[in-house]
């Protein structure tokens, strides 16, 4: 399989999986949802330079197969390009800083799971803004117009539990810029990847404090909040 075929398959895989497992997804939606919250950082590229994207997500788990949610993402570092202009006394340098911020909705389907392994297909759709900020001699700052940004990010995700409270994982995907204004020069359509260290805090808490189970702590907290 050549590289182009791989990316085409990656693009279509979430739609194929969801179409084939529609009945299973619908059945999972009948389960009582439980909330989840997570921080993530995905490594990718902008115009061939490595630039990580940071995200905050909140959503719900429906059983053990389906996860839905929303999030907020932004470019984690300053992607700066130096623009040089001829001036009467030499060359002036203007620093151009790319800014990327977008909201997302996501769906994640668990298609294989064992006691140690879990493989999922997360799919994320993003809508937000992209723009430039300019600075000259660290004094003058000017912001360009904000332009609409639409992103589609399918991923293949796998994780392995080393212990019942500790694991590791790898995400491999692709970021497609479905819409980006022509005034933005940088290329955003690139592969994404992420190495993950996973700590299952609930399990770890119960190991450290076996005489005070987390379930009992939650019940006491809820009881006090309703009094």
Image (cartoon, rainbow, N blue to C red):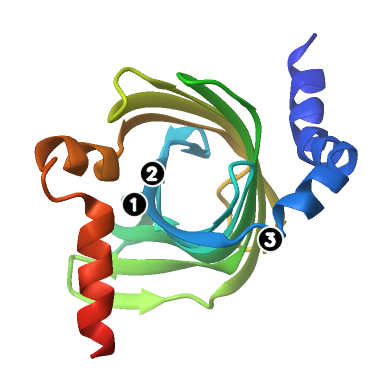
State if disc 2 and disc 1 touch (CB < 8 Å): yes
Which comes sooner in the sequence, label 2 or label 3? 2
Q: Is residue 183 left or right of residue 6?
A: left
- Within 10 Å of the Cα at label 1, are there few (<14), some (14-19), or many (20+) other Cα atoms? some
Residue at 80 percent across and 43 percent down: it is 24
Q: Position of residue 39 (x, y in %)?
A: 36, 51
Extreme residue in the top direction: 1
Q: Which quadrant holds residue 60?
A: bottom right
Q: Nearer the viewer, residue 40 or 77?
A: 40
Using the image, determine if residue 169 lies above or below residue 67. Answer: above
Please identify the residue farthest to the bottom as the structure is shown: 227
Q: Residues within 10 Å of mark 2 (few under 14, many from 20)?
A: some
Write down the quadrant of residue 87 in the picture: bottom left
**Residue for badge 3:** 182
On the image, the x and y values in percent for residue 112 come to 64, 25
Residue annotated with mark 1 = 76
Q: Earlier in the sequence, mark 1 or mark 2?
A: 2
For marks 1 and 2, give the one nearer the viewer.
2
What is the x, y in percent for residue 124? 63, 51
The residue lying at 62 percent from left, 55 percent from top is: 106
Quadrant the C terminus occupies: bottom left
């Amino acid at each position: 399989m050549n590289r182009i075929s791989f990316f085409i398959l990656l693009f279509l895989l979430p739609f194929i999986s969801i179409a084939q497992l529609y009945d299973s997804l619908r059945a999972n939606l009948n389960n009582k949802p439980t909330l989840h919250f997570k921080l993530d950082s995905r490594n990718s590229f902008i115009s061939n330079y490595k630039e990580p994207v940071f995200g905050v997500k909140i959503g719900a788990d429906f059983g053990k197969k389906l996860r839905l949610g929303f999030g907020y993402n932004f470019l984690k570092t300053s992607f700066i390009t130096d623009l040089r202009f001829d001036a009467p006394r030499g060359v002036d340098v203007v620093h151009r800083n790319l800014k990327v911020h977008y909201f997302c909705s996501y769906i994640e389907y668990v298609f294989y799971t064992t006691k140690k392994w879990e493989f999922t297909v997360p799919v994320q759709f993003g809508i937000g803004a992209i723009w430039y900020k300019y600075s000259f001699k660290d004094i003058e700052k000017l912001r360009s117009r904000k332009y609409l940004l639409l992103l589609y990010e399918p991923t293949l995700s796998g994780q392995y539990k080393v212990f019942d409270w500790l694991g590791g994982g790898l995400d491999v995907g692709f970021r497609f810029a479905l819409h980006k204004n022509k005034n933005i020069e940088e290329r955003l359509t690139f592969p994404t990847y992420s190495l993950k260290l996973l700590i299952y805090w609930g399990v770890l808490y119960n190991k450290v404090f076996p005489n005070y189970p987390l379930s009992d702590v939650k019940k006491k907290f809820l009881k006090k909040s309703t009094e």
